[in-house]
Amino acid sequence: MIAFAAGFITTLFYYDRELVGDEQNYHELAQGLLKNNFYGFPGERARRAPLYPMALSVFYLFGGSSTAVGYVLQNILGALMVLLAFLIVSKIHSRLAGIVAAVFVMLESYWWLNQVELMQENICAVLICFSLLLVLKERYCLSGIVLGFSILAKPMLLPLIVVLWLLYVFSKNKKHILKPLVLFSLCFMLPVFLWSVRNKVVLGSWIVVSSHSTYDIYVSNRRELRQSRKGLYIKPEHLISPTLDYLKSEPNKREVASYDYWKEKAIDEVKHIGVLGMSQIVFWKVVKFFSPSVFFEADTIVLKIFKGVLILLNSMLLLGFFFSIIKKKPYYWLALVLVLSMVITVMVVWGSIRFRYVLHPVIALWSATTFVDYLKSRKYVV
């Protein structure tokens, strides 16, 4: 209730703000679903991952299609994130650690920002936490399905790796872990498969999650095809000859042809750049995950230093988190690094760590357990 109230009060100051970027797209998709009874736009029936716009449309159905109603959804998701962190840590550690985990979740600047932004990260983070809670309850099939739905909110495979590993860590009988892992993995693929079937029925092609994914894969790795270093991509039809057949075809056929075209371009690009080129791409993708969303737009030495420190802290945090789980050894400094990274993000007002945010609650709850263990080792608490 405290988390929901904090988010709702924040919303009161920004409820009439103008939507920017992807927000407007999600808002229009949710409105279109109610108005037209189908998901997507003409010629873009599968461009966006569907879960968040669909959830938004449910709230619009009962509360009206005002963006303020969408913010209420964000408030609820933010509160659920805090509650799930508390429940998970209370189950694996103690009630005190659960309270600390809830506080750590709310300290993240992007948690506050997402109260007044119609973005999909909140629903993705909630599903990841809920999946982990179900793992603790040994409901492996349901846990896999829930995590699979997170892919339909924000296509990221890293949460799958994290939850799979935690499934192993928290398993009571590791000699018989293979069956739960297989069951979890198969159920994880079910939501993605069902959405792919939908795309096959609607578009006549097996498109996984998003028809825009192949374009993103190709263009995001080619700096010369961007409008600016901020990653504002120019539209596909501006990159290629307008005489191509797919630009003249019907909207649905055009979407499928575009998907296939960029898939071929992406495959050709991988063959062209070779192993070294792919290694560089993977490296910069990792840096992007560790850094704020607009790291490379730092225009002063001071900002570059701050952001470099932030990358270092996030690297320590994520690597420490993974090695702590692998070795089953609490690293007491994780909580300090987590708080420092969040404080620096707030101090320098350029943005937030969007790409790490979906895993933030999991890292926060793990850091909370190590922090309370440290307090107990020093006998500050019983």
Image (cartoon, rainbow, N blue to C red):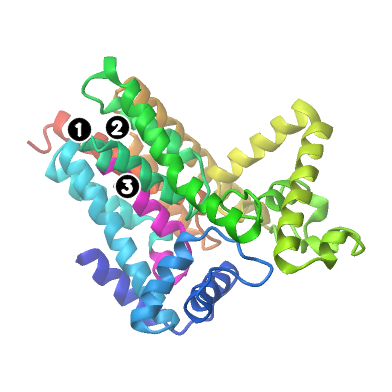
State the SS at label 1.
Answer: helix
Q: Give the amino acid at mark 1.
A: Asp
Q: Give the amino acid at mark 3.
A: Cys
For the point 76% across and 68% down, which residue is it? Answer: 250
| Residue 104 located left or right of residue 278 | left
The residue lying furthest to the left in this view is 382
Write down the residue under mark 2. Answer: 332
| Residue 48 located left or right of residue 153 | right
Magenta segment boundaries in residue numbering = 112-133
Q: Around disc 3, counting alpha carbons within 10 Å, would you say few (fewer than 14), some (14 to 19), or many (20 or more)?
A: many
Q: Give the amino acid at mark 2.
A: Tyr
Q: Position of residue 308 (x, y in %)?
A: 58, 44
- Look at the image and say whether residue 130 sits in the magenta stretch: yes
> What is the C-alpha distance between the residues marked 3 and 1?
22 Å
- Give the position of the C terminus as an image quadrant: top left
- Give the position of the N terminus as an image quadrant: bottom left
For the point 55% across and 76% down, which residue is it? Answer: 28
Write down the residue under mark 3. Answer: 129
